[in-house]
Image: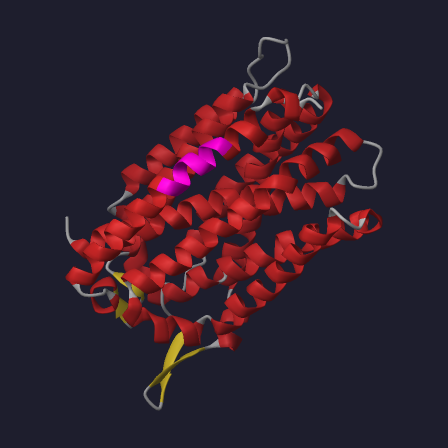
Amino acid sequence: MEASIIAITILWSFLYIYSMLGSLDFGAGFWGMIYGKKNNTGASLIANRFLSPTWEVTNVFLVLFVVALYSFFPFAASMLGVLFLLPIGLGLVLLTIRTTFMVFSHSVKRYGRLLQVISGITGILIPALLVSILPVTLGGFITMENGHHELLYGKLLTSFTTYAHILFGICTQFFLSALFLADYASVSKDPSAAQLYRKHAIVAGPVTIVVAVLTLFTLEPEASWFLTNVENHLYGFGMSLLLFLFGYAALFLKNRDGQRGLFRYAVVFVVLQYGFAIYAYGSSHLPYMVYPHLTIEEAFTNPSMFYALLIATIIGMAILVPAFYLFWKLFLKDRRYLEQ
């Protein structure tokens, strides 16, 4: 396997992990806002209990993704920095606001409701800004002016494919977060909250699949190369659909308590579903990072630097993985914490 392929695979892996954790994080913030003032306090408590210890972990993988991007592909920095300055900049501002309220909400309890509202609103806006980058990389939204690349904001903001990608991102976070919170509530011995989130997952799942398919039909003519590559990776997308059907079916099976929903199986199948979909999407995107202006080979660092960075990445993950496993056991698996 070529060094550049290894590097882009590592990058996509960080993106996959962040997209999963980010969907859970931002989605939990939205559900916490929705149920924050309603009588169903169980659903709100479940969302906020999950949100409290996990938002820091989510941000770690965002940092890892950015560091890996500019370490392995340094010659992409100037182009990506110019093209995505506005959406990424706005996203970071909103993320800073959200993080600030997360930090101080634990010491200033009277602003708890304000935190829920800000967490819910930013939980929609931040993913929308980040997902809006994807159609840009497929072609049709970049022009050359005086030897410099410029993003056509007018075309981007009036394109159906932009809003289709945004809608897909939002539906994904609703589906994943509802599914995971159903499992989280089930382990926490709160069957009413589990069934409530199960109903949301049942609705959001098929809607997400339909939006994903419709998004392909909204792509700009310049992205025809991508559709051709998608046809060559139908196996990955087919496996993704099959795993979704398994996970969705698990929501209707009864568990040992007689309640409908084998949530842990559903979560595992759906996470694997998105894994196949993201890697099939990434494979279809090759060899371009930004079509037709930048390929992974053009942006790639020199081989000697790559192997040094690869060793550093392996050492870093060897330190982080045990820490994340400990975090999982303490906050997402320990029944004493979950049932308190």
Work out whether residue 22 can be spotted.
no
Q: Is residue 102 magenta?
A: no
Can you give x and y, in whole percent of width and height, for residue 267 in the image?
50, 29
Q: Residue at 76% across / 49% down in the picture? A: 107
Can you give x and y, in whole percent of width and height, for residue 40 in the image?
80, 31
In the image, residue 120 above or below residue 94: above
Q: Residue at 64% across / 21% down in the picture? A: 336
Q: Residue at 43% across / 60% down in the picture? A: 134
Give the magenta range.
319-326
In the image, residue 144 above or below residue 141: below
Q: In the displayed structure, does residue 63 sit left or right of residue 93?
A: left
Q: Nearer the viewer, residue 292 or 82?
A: 82
Q: Quadrant of the C terminus?
A: top right
Q: In the displayed structure, does residue 275 sit left or right of residue 215?
A: left
Work out whether residue 226 can be spotted.
yes
Residue 80 in which image quadrant:
bottom left
Q: Nearer the viewer, residue 196 or 16?
A: 16
What scheme was used to colour the molecule? secondary structure
Q: Is residue 321 magenta?
A: yes
Q: How many marks?
A: 0
Q: Residue at 49% across / 57% down in the picture? A: 131
Can you give x and y, in whole percent of width and height, for residue 76 in the image?
32, 70
Q: Nearer the viewer, residue 146 or 329?
A: 329
Residue 320 in which image quadrant:
top left
Q: Main secondary structure of the magenta part?
A: helix
Residue 298 in which image quadrant:
bottom left
